[in-house]
Every structure is written in structure tokens, then in C-alpha cells.
């Protein structure tokens, strides 16, 4: 399928698809006219990429975790996926702690406002 067809079927822009292809996250072949041609399974591949991006992984981490998916689209418990997802949770915990600290500072500042 052509890139515009993949974009329509996956809901992802052609620009993003080109980027994923250039990074090796998607595979395509070039037609004689230079157009990218994607296999039907590319829709599922894009879904996997978007899932990993949606949970906060960067593209480099996505490239590391993608091989951990089974052919039917399930993420396996491979060591790479386990380690990367644990690291992502740890990073989120750090962000949550920082946000809670900032919220406390804001609430304290609000409590200390002087009415004028």
C-alpha cells in the first residue's frame, strides 16, 4: 500500500510514517517510481509504534522494544521490554514526585497571599 493509504488506515500523518521508515521502525520497499510501498501488516506495526510512543517512550526506546512483540501484536516479557518499561515507570514516579513538590509550593504560596 502507498504511504497515503497507510496514513489513512493508521490515522498517522505521512510525515510521521516517513520518519518511522527512515529510522527503520517500519519497513517498506521502493516502487519503480520511487514511492514507498508498505505491506498490509504495516498498519499493525504503526499501531505498535504509537502504543509505545503513547506510554512515553522515545523513538530510540521504541526501536529497542519493537522486537519484543509477537506476530499477533502482543508485547512479550522479553528482558528489553521489562527493563525499559520499568525505567519508564521510574521516570514517571520521579515526575510525579516533582509535580507534587511544585503543587505544594504553589498551594503554600496561595495560602500566603495577602488580600489587598
Image (cartoon, rainbow, N blue to C red):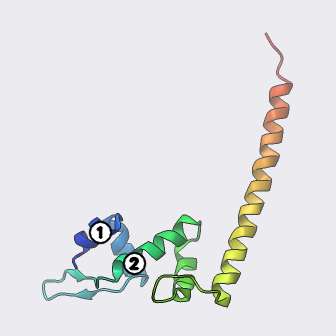
Q: CA distance from mark 2 to mark 1?
A: 10 Å
Q: Is residue 6 above or below residue 93?
A: below
Q: Residues within 10 Å of mark 1 (few under 14, many from 20)?
A: some
Query: For the C terminus, which image quadrant?
Result: top right
Image side of residue 74 versus residue 112, left or right: left
Q: Secondary structure under badge 2? A: helix
Task: Choose the circle earlier in sequence order: 2 or 1.
Answer: 1
| Identity of the residue drawn at 68% across and 70% down | 88
Image side of residue 26 versus residue 83, left or right: left
Corner quadrant of residue 112: top right
Q: How many marks?
A: 2
Spot occupied by residue 84 in the image (x, y as percentages of width and height): 66, 79
Spot occupied by residue 3 in the image (x, y as percentages of width and height): 25, 74
Image side of residue 107 versus residue 76, left or right: right
| Identity of the residue drawn at 35% across and 86% down | 27
Give the labeled residue for mark 1: 9
Spot occupied by residue 100 in the image (x, y as percentages of width and height): 79, 48
Residue that extends furthest to the left in the rendered view of this protein: 33
| Identity of the residue drawn at 65% across and 86% down | 77
Corner quadrant of residue 34: bottom left
Image side of residue 77 versus residue 41, left or right: right
Give the labeled residue for mark 2: 44
Amino acid at each position: 500500500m502507498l504511504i497515503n493509504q497507510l496514513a489513512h488506515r493508521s490515522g498517522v500523518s505521512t510525515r510521521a510514517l516517513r520518519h518511522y521508515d527512515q529510522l527503520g521502525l517500519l519497513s517498506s520497499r521502493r516502487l519503480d517510481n520511487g514511492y514507498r510501498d508498505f505491506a498490509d501488516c504495516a498498519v499493525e506495526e504503526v499501531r505498535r509504534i504509537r502504543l509505545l510512543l503513547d506510554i512515553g517512550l522515545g523513538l530510540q526506546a521504541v526501536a529497542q522494544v519493537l522486537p519484543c512483540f509477537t506476530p499477533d501484536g502482543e508485547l512479550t516479557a522479553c528482558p528489553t521490554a521489562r527493563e525499559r518499561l520499568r525505567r519508564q515507570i521510574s521516570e514517571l514516579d520521579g515526575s510525579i514526585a516533582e509535580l507534587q513538590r511544585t503543587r505544594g509550593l504553589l498551594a503554600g504560596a496561595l495560602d500566603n497571599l495577602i488580600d489587598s
